[in-house]
Structures are given as structure tokens and as C-alpha cells.
Image: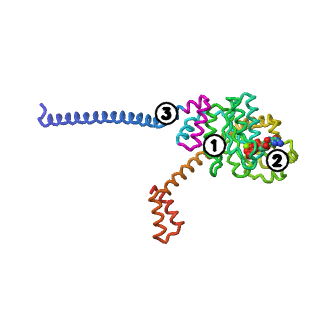
Amino acid sequence: MKPAGETQERKERKERERENSRVFSSLIASTVLWLISWFLLRVFASSRFNSRIDPPIQGLAARIRAGERGALARGISLVEAGDTRGRELAALLYHDGGAAHTVGITGPPGAGKSTLTDALTRAYRQRGERVAVLAIDPVSPLTGGATLGDRTRMMAAASDTGVFIRSSAARGHDSGLGFTAVQVMRLMAAAGYGRVLVETVGTGQDGVSVASVAATVLLVQTPGTGDEVQALKAGVLEIADVFVVNKAETPGADALMYDLRDVAHATGTRGDWTPPVLPTTAISGEGVPAVLDAIEAHRAHLDASGEGEARRAARLLAEVRALVRHDVLTAMDAYLRDAAVTDRVHQALAMSDEDPLAVAHALFMQWKRGE
Ligand SMILES: Nc1nc2c(ncn2[C@@H]2O[C@H](COP(=O)(O)OP(=O)(O)OP(=O)(O)O)[C@@H](O)[C@H]2O)c(=O)[nH]1
Ligand SMILES: [Mg+2]
């Protein structure tokens, strides 16, 4: 016979065990419940996130992918207006245009960039390729004359659906070549244009930025004053993958080509690519097939050498920086215009001995801290 105390103890132990298992199972149950609600919340949140992408923008993206020209034009307008829906659109179409080859055509005003772009476009069309052109600031005040716009109308009249041409006014300090141009070109590529050409005026530093939007850069020069090559800035020479001497039928073309070849060998060589120097008469189309071949050769070089990937990475970095810079400036502008902040500045300047430099520094630090 067991002592009464021992039985009591056993009873209590059993009771405790039962209690423990109750606590344990309720713990399991609440964990499961918690996991389920967490999962449901995630699903809910992500569906809310998706629904935050404007359904019309998703529709527009689909229509652009299908190659609808009207949709592409509308999408480009959204991007150029700096509309947030434009950014959403460009983001949605980011993976759609990977196969397109982007070609920048730059050079001084009146060199014949538009005429050459037009000739290249026709040549690509004859080869059955679809071409989109972005002409940035196409009419220079110097030449004013023949513009791509005139030819655009001609092509539109011929209703060639394999060509899409868009003119864009240069804006702001980045000559319109910041993220806006990249996004417009991305939309064009997503719409199925395998060649995306971008024409931009530039002889100095401003011309350099074309390299941040195009895989292959053509630098168009013309014979004339005799000091063209000297006038070229080092930065421009470095970005040129193909030199084109346009108006090659005019006097001085041979001398210019000779000089440019010198320069191309001295400074332009990158890896096993030395920029070729090619003569064209863009108005008649002479020399244009050789330019097409050079673009193709450069594309092959980019693929084979790995330089294409490296440049793509550099372009994406430049784009991210431009976007962030834009957002920071926009946010900063709004902050500075804020009435309370303006009051604070007035007070700091009026009530203390603080100079504008100190006030500006303090304000910047406050902005960084989110005050
Ligand atoms: N002689 C000759 N004239 C040409 C040639 N190519 C273009 N032009 C003329 O040069 C002028 C300027 O040509 P555009 O194609 O408008 O030059 P652009 O570089 O686009 O000029 P902007 O965009 O205004 O900087 C036009 O009158 C063209 O007809 C060429 O090969 N030979
Ligand atoms: Mg032009």
C-alpha cells in the first residue's frame, strides 16, 4: 500500500503535466494562427501593392508590347512629362527590350546628323529591320533648315509601320539625356524596334552623355574650318566608337579623315577596337552601308569582348544616379519652399549673427535628419 502523501504527489504531478500540455498545445495553436494571419496579411499587402500600379498603365504596357504605335506615343508623353505613371510604365517594360541595339548619333550642329539618321533608317528598313528614332533638340538655331521632322512627316505619309520617329526638346541641364531619354528608348525597344537611334547635338561635354544612353556612339564631323579635330574635346573622342566624316564630297574631307584616323589610333583604341573613320554623303546615301557594317562590327565586338556588359552596367549606374539626383532635388525644393522652413531661415538670419553659409549648413543637416 502506497502512502497517502505519495498518491497526492502523483496526482499533482499528473495535473501539472496535463496543465503543461494544455499550455503547449495552445501555444502551438496560437503560433499556427499567427503564421496563417501573417501569410494572409502578406497576400493582402502584395495584392494591394499590385493594385497600386495603375491598371490603365498595365493596359498601356501590354499595348506597347503588342507594338501599338498610339500606345507607344502616349507612353513616351507620360515619361517625358515626368509623370510617376511614366516611371511605372518604364519599370513594367524594363525586361521587354533587351535585344534592341541602341545607337547614338552625335556631332556639332548642322553636321548632317539628321540626314545621316534618316539614311541609316532607310538602310535598316531595306534590311527588314524595325527602327525607332529619338531626335533630341533636332532643330539647331544655327542651321534651322532641314529637320528630321520634315522627313518624319514623309515617312508617316508613307505609313511605314516599321519606323517610329519621335522628336524631343532638350530640357534642363542634362540636355534631356538623363533618365527620360533612357526610359523613352526603353519603351521603343519594348515595342519591338530592334534598332533604337538617338540623335543629339554635342561637341563638348554635353555630347559625352550620349554614351550613357547608347551602346554604340557615332561621332559625325564635317570638313570646313580646318581645325575640327583640334576643337574636339578629349571626352568626345573617347566616347566615339565610329567616326563619320559627312559631306565627304566637299573639299577638305580627305584631310579631316587623315587627322581623325590619327586621333582614333592615338586615343580612341579600347581593347581590340579601334574606331573606324568612314566617309559619307548622307544626302545621297553614299557610304551609309559601310557605316551600317561598322555599327554591326562594333555590336559584335561589344558582345565578344564583354565590354557590352560592362558598359550596360555603367549606363544603369548612371541612370540610377540621375533618378536619385532628380528625386533628391525635387524633395529638397519642396522642403525649401515650405513656409515653416522659410520662416526658420528668416529668423536664423535676422535674430542671430549667423552667416548664410552657417544657416545653409544647419538647414541641410536638419533636412538630412528629416526635421
Ligand atoms: N553637301 C552636303 N550637305 C549635307 C550632307 N548631309 C547633310 N547635308 C545638309 O546639311 C544641312 C544640315 O543637315 P542636318 O541633317 O539637318 O544636320 P544636323 O546635324 O541634324 O543639324 P542639327 O540637328 O540642326 O544640329 C542640311 O541642309 C543638309 O541637307 C552631305 O552629305 N553633303
Ligand atoms: Mg538634326
> Residues under labels 1 and 3: Cα distance?
24 Å
Relative image position of residue 53 (x, y in whole percent)? 49, 36
Residue 51 numbered mark, or none: none
Nearer mark to the viewer, of 3 and 2: 3
Circle 3 SS class: helix
> Which residue is label 2 attached to?
260
Q: Are marks 2 and 1 in contact (CB under 8 Å)?
A: no
Relative image position of residue 78 (x, y in whole percent)? 57, 40
Q: Is residue 112 visible?
A: no
Residue at 62%, 37% in the rendered image: 186
* Left or right position of 180 against 243: left
Residue bounds of the magenta highlight? 60-83
Q: Is residue 97 above or below residue 349?
A: above
Tag 2: Cα neighbours inside 10 Å, few (<14), some, or many (≥20)? many
Please name whichever residue, 290 or 266, is drawn nearer the observer in this view of the structure: 290
- Residue located farthest toward the bottom when viewing the structure as drawn: 353
* Amino acid type indicated by mark 1: Ala
Question: Which numbered disc, 3 or 2, marks the residue that appears first in the sequence?
Answer: 3
Please name whichever residue, 52 or 74, is drawn nearer the observer in this view of the structure: 74
Disc 1 beta carbon < 8 A from ligand 2? Answer: no
Relative image position of residue 137 (x, y in whole percent)? 68, 45
> Which residue is label 3 attached to?
55
Please name whichever residue, 146 or 83, is drawn nearer the observer in this view of the structure: 146
Please name whichever residue, 334 or 235, is drawn nearer the observer in this view of the structure: 334
Residue at 56%, 49% in the rendered image: 326
